[in-house]
Image (tube, coloured by chain):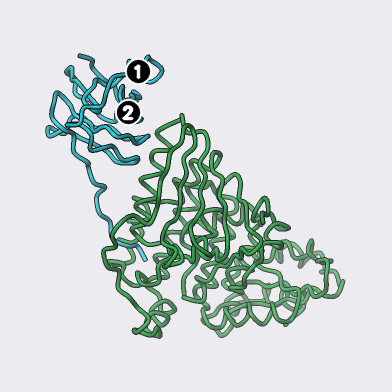
Amino acid sequence: MVSPVEVANQWMSRGGREAFSPLFGQPCLVVDLSNEIALPETLAACWTAGLRELACPSIAWCPGPGGRDRHRASGFDVVASDGAELEAIVETCVAQPLASLALVQLLRRTEESSIHAGLESESLVYSMLQAGPGFSNWLSARDPESLHRPEARPGSPLRVERSGAVLELVLDRPEKRNAFSAQLRDALAEALDVVLADSGISEVRWRAEGPAFCAGGDLDEFGTLPDPATAHAIRSTRNVARLVAACAERLRVEVQGACVGAGVELPAFAARVVARHDAFFALPEVAMGLVPGAGGTVSLPRRIGRQRTAWMALTGAKVDAKTALQWRLVDELSD
Amino acid sequence: MPQFKPGTRLKSAVCNSEVMVVLAPATEVELTCGGAAMVEMGSDAGGGDLDPAHSDGTQIGKRYTNEAGDLEVLCTKPGDGSLAADGTALQVKGAKPLPSSD
């Protein structure tokens, strides 16, 4: 851990910037903001700009409750407020340095770009990481016994029911914890097409059968992509996040249990998210060498800001329903 | 017989089905659901009985086309009747398959 003055001095020095890189043994930069020493003015300006250009995640160390120093941490990628958080974030940066870097760079821009541009950036980054060593290591470390290659399943993973002006979408693969498969992607795209075509639908209610709303991407399908460049073209062609965002104003989502990966990324676009008390939210992708890929780097920053989005993605921690409400990741709690 | 424009919303006269015209031929065509001519949304449904020969039902979200491929409708509300153009049943047009991008 270094002080702001030390970092700024190194940043200013000749060739100093290259040192802040996972390629030179620095997968992240932790800066101690726990004391109130002010930066000399000459350093303050390059400091703020520098954080945005850094080739590794910048972590602000702000111990203690209340986020006393949060205003000083505003340019940072992520804030750690206790030792366990800091350890978890640094561990992820060490284990998956390339995905961690790509994540924070993505979040530095998606917060300010349009939804469409943000989704495009996310998909490009996701595809890049699909070709990286972090993801292939994660794939090869999996227990092959745990895999069930996708078989054609009878019936649809989504029930679509229309009653008057209300369209109800129900995730209906509880035995798979409603994992987000290509089949579910196609079914959602079909249903959301109807919403966009028919202005007579005034409300879309989206919920899920079983104890979990959605456990995220279907792990059985991970690694089945044709190739990363084609995978990006697939996401550009049929993109559920784009469709969800397009009908967000009419969308109300009720979530429970696990809301992981796509299971939080897609609901976060909706105008109204109601969480049952047992709901929890997590972004596990960076630990797999990837970034959130179902629109989460666009939808979550719009609700909770880029630092908390980075915090979720870099810690992988579960955020409970109560915290989610405080953060406005959800709008309402239910029994 | 009417001539349809893309974007026109139609409902069945004899069941709950509703569709939106996606693609329409330049010529007149008789579009039926449940054996009865479909009517524009907002107009009087007319009533009548479902023809058992046209009762395979419609599915929400599915696109239906004729053999020539110049007529396509999107089902926005399902019902018991099935769709036909000039007496020939429309077929479900499946979405083009795309592999997983994961």
Hue used for the chain lettered B: cyan
Quick one: A281 or B37, which is closer to the camera? B37
Which residue sits at x=54%, y=43%?
Answer: A251
**Is B76 displayed left or right of A310 in the figure?**
left
Kind of residue indicated by mark 2: Cys
How many numbered marks, from 0 up? 2
User: In this view of the protein, which residue sits in the foreground, B86 or A182?
Assistant: B86
**Where does the image place residue A136, in percent across and percent down from the top left?**
38, 79
Chain drawn green, letter? A
- Classify mark 2: helix, strand or loop: loop
Q: Which residue is outermost to the right?
A: A36
Label 1 crowd (10 A; few <14 / some 14-19 / many >=20): some
Q: Is residue B75 above or below residue A101?
A: above
Q: Which image quadrant is residue B68 in?
A: top left
Which part of the image, by quadrant, shows the C terminus of chain A?
bottom right
Q: Which chain is home to disc 1?
A: B
Q: Amino acid at mark 1?
A: Ala
Callout 2 touching callout 1 (CB < 8 Å): no
**Mark 2 to mark 1: distance in Å?**
10 Å
Indicate which disc residue B37 carries.
none
**Location of mark 2 (residue):** B15
Subunit ID for the residue under disc 2:
B
Question: Which sits earlier in the primary sequence, circle 2 or circle 1?
Answer: 2
Q: Position of residue A78 (x, y in %)?
A: 67, 68
Q: Residue at x 18, y 34 (%)?
A: B90
Label 1: state its secondary structure: loop
| Residue on which disc 1 sits | B45
Left or right: where B31 falls relative to A325: left
